[in-house]
Amino acid sequence: MFNLQDVISIKDFQKEDINFILDEAKKLEKVAMSQEKSEELAGKILGMMFFEPSTRTRLSFETAMKRLGGNCIGFAGSAASSVSKGENLADTSKMFEAYSDAIVIRHDLEGVGRFISDIVDVPVINAGDGAGQHPTQTLLDLYTIKREFNKIKGLNVALVGDLKYGRTVHSLAYALGMFGTEMTFVAPDDLKMPNEILHDLKKNNIKFNETSNIKDVIDDIDVLYVTRIQKERFPDVEEYSKIKGAYLINYDLIKGKDLIVMHPLPRIDEIAHDIDNTKYNKYFEQAFYGVPIRMAILKNIIKNKM
């Protein structure tokens, strides 16, 4: 059984919850690929409140719901909703509660998912809250790793790039720690993993290393998890310009290494296209795995409310 009522933060998950979703996603892969049909959520509606831009997350949630026989309503961008007329977030959420069986929200403010889950009586799924958490991305990241190596524990994972503002790596660090994965955080000084996350990891006796030089770790890792430098998170454009392009992962860097390259996408210039058609590239498969993972979450979180 999946026991969570909402999916807000990976820190709300137990290891058993994660394993349950990963196992459920594997069972649903054929449905995700349209090789089998499902009506598990026939007649159910997913409300999608996307205040920030999204391609993969929004479309994979919509695909997941429709593959399960359900349907979606919602908006992409606040200009397409009554928020543009001055309606507050709480009122908008209450309207979605009236029309939907579950709500997915992406917002630029950290903590919005938790706020909404406290005021509505349908399941809420956080699809990214500012520089906070992105739990469903973490689950598909874990699924990608497990599909590739048939395990998560005992691997060596390097998280590279914008670790300060990157919500995907914040969630992923907590989750990898649950599985006993060895982690190295690779970032320039101005974009290091936030101290509160490092403190939490240390408190739970989770081991990690930090460096600013990717060549320090490239020979010893199984997974190279790359993130873009996020211009939209920087309060100062000049700060962004100084750091943009700090890391470039190309074929020459990883040639002959025994690793895979992952990225939550979109990429800008941090992964060269000469990796795309090589065995190292797993970022497009990773994006697809968002569908069975989100199918598993929607199926169980909505059915738990029925």
Image: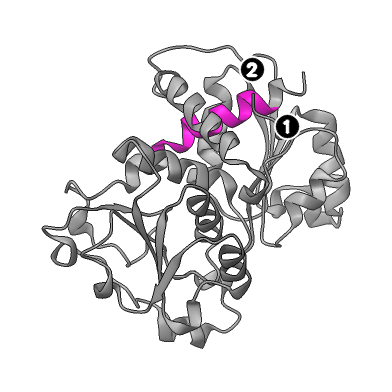
Q: Nearer the viewer, residue 281 or 304?
A: 304
Q: Quadrant of residue 151?
A: top left
Q: Earlier in the sequence, mark 1 or mark 2?
A: 2
* Residue, disc 1: 102
Q: How crowded is the residue under tag 2: few (<14 C-alpha within 10 Å), some, or many (20+)?
A: many
Quadrant position of the N terminus in the picture:
top right
Q: Are marks 1 and 2 in contact (CB under 8 Å)?
A: no
Relative image position of residue 53 (x, y in whole percent): 57, 54
Relative image position of residue 169 (x, y in whole percent): 50, 60
The amino acid beneath tag 2 is: Leu
- Residue at screen point 82% across, 34% down: 97
Q: Which residues are magenta?
A: 288-301
Relative image position of residue 31 (x, y in whole percent): 45, 18
The disc placed on residue 41 is 2
Q: Nearer the viewer, residue 179 or 144?
A: 179
- Residue at screen point 71% across, 62% down: 109
Helix, strand or loop at disc 1? strand
Q: Nearer the viewer, residue 6 or 154?
A: 154
> Compared with residue 9, is residue 267 higher up or lower down, i.e. above or below?
below
The amino acid beneath tag 1 is: Ala
- Residue at the extreme left: 256
